Amino acid sequence: RPVPEVEWIDNQGKTIADGAKFKIETSGLNTCLTIQKIEIAHRGEFTCRVRNRCGEDKYAIGIQVTDRPEPPGKPTVQDQNVDSVKLLWAVPKQDGGSAIRNYIVEMKTENDKTWAKAEVTKQPFTTLFHLVAGETYRFRVRADNVFGQSDPSEEADHGYGTILSPDRLLPPPPKEREEEQPEAVDYEKLDTTVGEAELNKTVDLNRIPNDLQAKYIICEELGRGAYGTVYRAIERATGKTWAAKMVQVRPGVKKENVLHEMDMMNQLHHEKLLHLHEAFDLGNEMCLIEEFVSGGELFDKIMEDDSLMSEPEVRDYMHQILLGLQHMHQKNIVHLDLKPENILLKAKGSTDIKIIDFGLARKLDPKRGVKLLFGTPEFCAPEVVNYQPVGLATDMWTVGVISYVLLSGLSPFLGDSDEETLANVSAADWDFDDPSWEDVSDLAKDFICRLMAKDKRKRMSVQEALQHPWIVGPMLSAFKDLSDYVEKSAPKYRGKVPLRQKRDFMARKRWSDDLLPIGRLAKRGAIFRRLSMDGVFERNISFDTDCAPIIRKRLEDIFANVGDLIATLSCDVEGMPAPRIRWFKGDKELPTNSPKYNTRYLNGLAELTVKNIEETDAGIYTCRATNDLGSIETQAKLVIEAPKKKH
């Protein structure tokens, strides 16, 4: 008391008056607002406010109005080709109170009387294929939600719907292209870090989302090919920069090949391997959100300043490549497409590398064969060319070839034609006769020789390569002091790349207008490869059953007490042929079975049991696994705790 005054306020914050649109009835302690002819514009909060001289109160009432959506924006042609056109449109201003489920793209030619459904997509863009060159098309779009389908959008501007004949698909004049260039982006200042949690993240291939636009801002184009485009993308939630590889799924690029590459990247989480962050299924396009790399190709370093690379530089690059390969080979995955073009530098001026393009990568399975298209035959192993089984050693051959190229500027098997190159690789005939090898160390040459062996059984495994004296390099303890180390290990000038070699490299270097080298994934990636392309050849591949020993689970330190009956050290080891397992305490090899020790190796589990624990059993124990293809070991401590004294 006294009876309060009643005021109704609409969703725009304005006081409502009784009239044609609204009817207000207040009687005693009740008040009622009736909205006549409800519209989408009425969606939101309406407020009832009551007040008298003692005070006031208010209550908000939410109103949800549902309807079919408003029409989308007018479609615009973002890109077009001889038989295809890419359309882009704005989402509806009002979605009708329900999420947009699909966009229906309609088209008709100048002679058609009715509109025909051309495509259904969940994203506000699509690419239409199999159009007729020289024909003029009109395009419009509808949106639908659970309540129905919108009216059609405005038609695309007349003329933009014309599919040009091939002779009219010419690039714009240079001046026009300069005017259209976006504002320069300093890629080195962008946040492109991949955190530990992100590095170990995997993509659920059975539930690939389609909400790309909701999660990412798609920025400038970095590179383009016949079936794909790479863009810079900004993650809305974090502000981090990624590379968005858009792949058009059509007869030229099978969806299963895209999913295979994603599956391989899903299993590989290492700082030297390009990381797959997320993926989206957009119907006729797949989008892979990958780590953003702004540096150049390792290929380019060969020609930098026209001078040959120093050994310490090459050794550093090869060490990084081996670390990435080690992670792959530990998972029994072979890359099969290693070459300088597929090794990028993390950033401009950086020496950190990333191995890219896992389209040919395969998990070794001797029971399954596969037909693959290989490119750049000069970096393929002889067993690939000669139709023989491939294995982990196939990658190691290529590591040797890359080392050879970086140290000399020469490609050891490059011929005047693809056929000649394949014949050279098949024969595996190479040497160090060129003058560029005169100032290369014997250790570096030995490293290459142990990799470029035609018999793959004689090649080093990745573990052995990482332990090679040339890769390990001189230790600091071998020098008098730090200044002596810096002076003697610093890169040394090795002279110019001979004109003949430079000419060969420039002939092989494919011109590209991509904004960044990572943009070339859209045209040179293995999933885009065609048999008609230069340097591409096909092979039916079978896989080796043989592999060097691999440690799946390393030894771990254990604790025991004096007087314990047993203490057991164990690790998981695989290899084919089955490895020979040897155990050591310090430098002394232990017997396989004795009153003190029992050893066992069964189904990949290697165990050492130490019996009747004494203080003298404490120490470092080593498990070494060896077969014809290599050797590997792991160590751990057995810590003996003295018995507690009785009080």
Image (tube, helix red, strand yellow):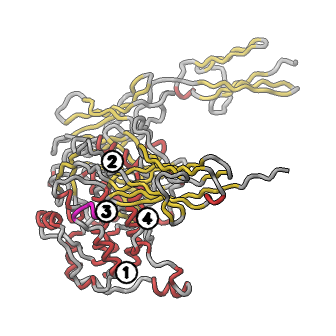
Whether residue 22 sits left or right of residue 272 in the image: it is right
In the image, what residue type sits under mark 3? Met
**Residue 160 falls within the magenta-colored stretch:** no
Q: Secondary structure at mark 2?
A: strand
Residue tagged 2: 363
In the image, what residue type sits under mark 1? Ser
Q: Secondary structure at mark 3?
A: helix
Residue tagged 4: 346
For label 1, count other residues whose C-alpha is less than 10 Å away and answer few (under 14), some (14-19) or many (20+).
some
Q: Nearer the viewer, mark 2 or mark 1?
A: 2
Whether residue 214 sits left or right of residue 546 in the image: it is right
Q: Secondary structure at mark 4?
A: loop
Sequence-first disc among 3 and 2: 2
For the residues labelled 4 and 2, the Cα–Cα distance comes to 26 Å
Residue tagged 1: 310
Residue tagged 3: 396
Task: Examine the rendering and report whether any part of residue 464 can be seen.
Answer: yes
Q: Residue at coordinates 34% horizontally, 82% vertically from top-left?
A: 441
Q: Nearer the viewer, mark 1 or mark 3?
A: 3
